[in-house]
Image (spheres, rainbow, N blue to C red):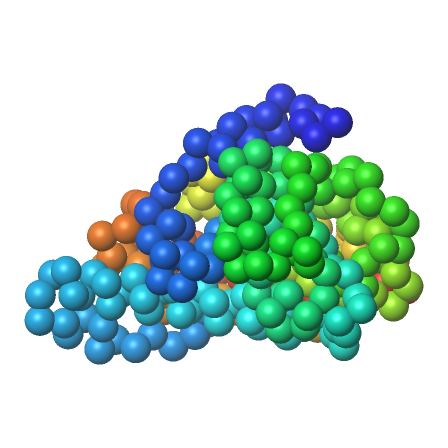
Amino acid sequence: MTIASDYQNDVANYWNAERNPVNLRLGDVTGIYHHHYGIGEVDWSVLDAADDVGREEAIITELHRLENAQARLLLGHLGNIRPEHRLLDAGSGRGGSSIMANAAFGCRVDGVSISQAQVDFANDQAAKRNVSDKVRFHLKNMLDTGFEDGAFQAIWNNESTMYVVLEDLFAEHSRLLARGGRYVTITGCYNDVYGLPSKAVSVINAHYVCDIHPRSGYFRAMAANRLVPVSVIDLTAETIPYWELRQKAAVATGIEDTFLQAYRDGSFQYLLIAADRV
């Protein structure tokens, strides 16, 4: 069953209806569509365009460059991927990271989402790029995909773990990964040192209909499911410039101030975690 709860039905409905310009206009720059944020230093000269239209287009292009940089960082932690390998993009959105993975490694990539609209959009993008034989998107639940045991050399979640129970997710990933395979996530998590979720984190949860996990929850759930971390990178400082630029864009959604507050007061962190299946 793809939809296993009322909450998952709400999430599917949210993404089926989502047509946010901050996702679509950025993707229009290169035809690579993401549902995640960006990292890296901003080229602030984009604000110097002579007119409002030129300035906005420059900002959009720069935001897209930063979100592609984030995806490349994640893919760079998947390990030694060869063309004969198979990868899984869990919570694949409109498919940008999967298409980038195929271009980088030449291997087969499967993406799963509980949003039919996302699956259809992503498959259309794969067809337009003539990679449908290698890149396929499925209406499946990442907690119960139905794929065979040990089928994948690498699996990733790019900002999608906050929609599921981590123990259930990592149990399924552990089942699907070949021994020695690699799991990578980039995710926002609340900082255990700060204490319980801050007001800003709660606002983010409400905005995206999600449930942000504590940092410690990732490592507990991984340890319980034979996933041993090999790399943990705090990207919080790296993502703040993206949000500072997005504040100035016409596609801003109003959540930008909240993200910046949460990152700056230490209650929220942006992490990359890579782990091996043992």
Report the side of 97 relative to 31 (left or right). Answer: right
Number of callouts in the render? 0
Which image quadrant for residue 277? bottom right
Please tell me which residue is depicted at 47% across the width and 46% down the height of the picture. Answer: 201
Residue displayed at 55% across by 26% down: 10
Q: Can residue 250 be seen in the rendering of this structure?
A: yes
Is residue 78 depicted above or below 256 in this figure?
below
Q: Position of residue 251 (x, y in %)?
A: 28, 51
Indicate whether 68 appears above or below 127. Answer: below
Report whether 221 appears left or right of 211. Answer: right
- 128 lies above or below 78: above
Q: Residue at x 87, y 68 (%)?
A: 180
Vertically, is 155 above or below 42? above
In this view, the residue farthest toward the top is 6
Residue sitting at x 45%, y 43%: 204
Check the picture and name the quadrant holding the C terminus.
bottom right
Q: Position of residue 51 (x, y in %)?
A: 9, 65
Coordinates of residue 181 in the picture (x, y in percent)? 83, 65
Q: Quadrant of the N terminus?
A: top right
Q: Nearer the viewer, residue 235 or 145?
A: 145
Q: Is residue 74 visible?
A: no
Q: Does residue 168 appear left or right of residue 135 in this picture?
A: right
Q: Give x and y (percent) for residue 226.
A: 88, 58
The answer to which image quadrant residue 276 occupies is: bottom right
Q: Residue furthest left?
A: 50
